[in-house]
Amino acid sequence: MTTITLTEEQYKTIIQDFYAPPEKRSRLSQSETVAIADGLNKKIDIPIFLSEEKEQKILVKIVTKIDGFLYDNLPNEVYDLIRSLPEGISDEEARRIVSSFSKLANDKIDIKYIPEVLEYIAISFVINVLVNAMRKNWTLGKALETFNEIESPSDPHMEWDFPDGNG
């Protein structure tokens, strides 16, 4: 059994991340959030008559809400794997996380202004993209490109086709 050794500074950083205020409970950068919102925009159309600019702002808010959910429910050390090519989770672990987190997020996040089927597609798209980006040798760009090519599920709680390890 390995003994955990932390400097005082490392411990403080862990605690600061864990107790971060709501406005800091995010792991995605602005460009990552916008890129995912762009991908989501290709998958769903918000049924409220809005300009494309306003719809894009709503999609950024949806991605931000899901980012906060993942921040609260995944250790940051795992979530940060979206930026690590050599490290990553296995295909099996990715499948498990996608399945359980898509359902959990859909139970916890209520997007009142879109129908349930679109809410589930939005939540599961974002989670699929982010969790696949956590896989070994995957990037956020590769995950976005892969899921932009996969057909969206048409019913609530249907699973997305899961890409193989080669993407």
Image (spheres, grey):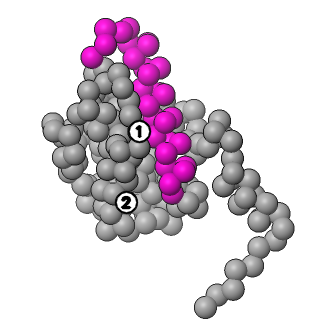
Q: Is residue 111 above or below residue 92?
A: above
Q: Is residue 166 visible?
A: no
**Could you tell whether 156 is left or right of 69 in the image?**
left
Image quarter of residue 123: top left
Contact? badges 2 and 1 (CB < 8 Å) = no
**Could you tell whether 92 is left or right of 9 in the image?**
left
What residue do we see at 31% from left, 8% from top? 49
Q: Which residues are magenta?
A: 47-74
Q: CA distance from mark 2 to mark 1?
A: 17 Å
At which x and y percent is residue 14?
A: 71, 60
Main SS category, magenta section? helix
Mark nearer the N terminus (2 vs 1): 2
In the image, which disc is placed on residue 97?
A: 2
At which x and y percent is residue 103?
A: 31, 50
Quarter placement of the C terminus? bottom left
Does 50 appear in magenta? yes
Quarter placement of the N terminus? bottom right
Q: Is residue 131 above or below residue 38?
A: below
Residue at the limit of the structure toward the bottom, as seen here: 1
At which x and y percent is residue 25?
A: 61, 43
Q: Which residue is mark 1?
A: 109
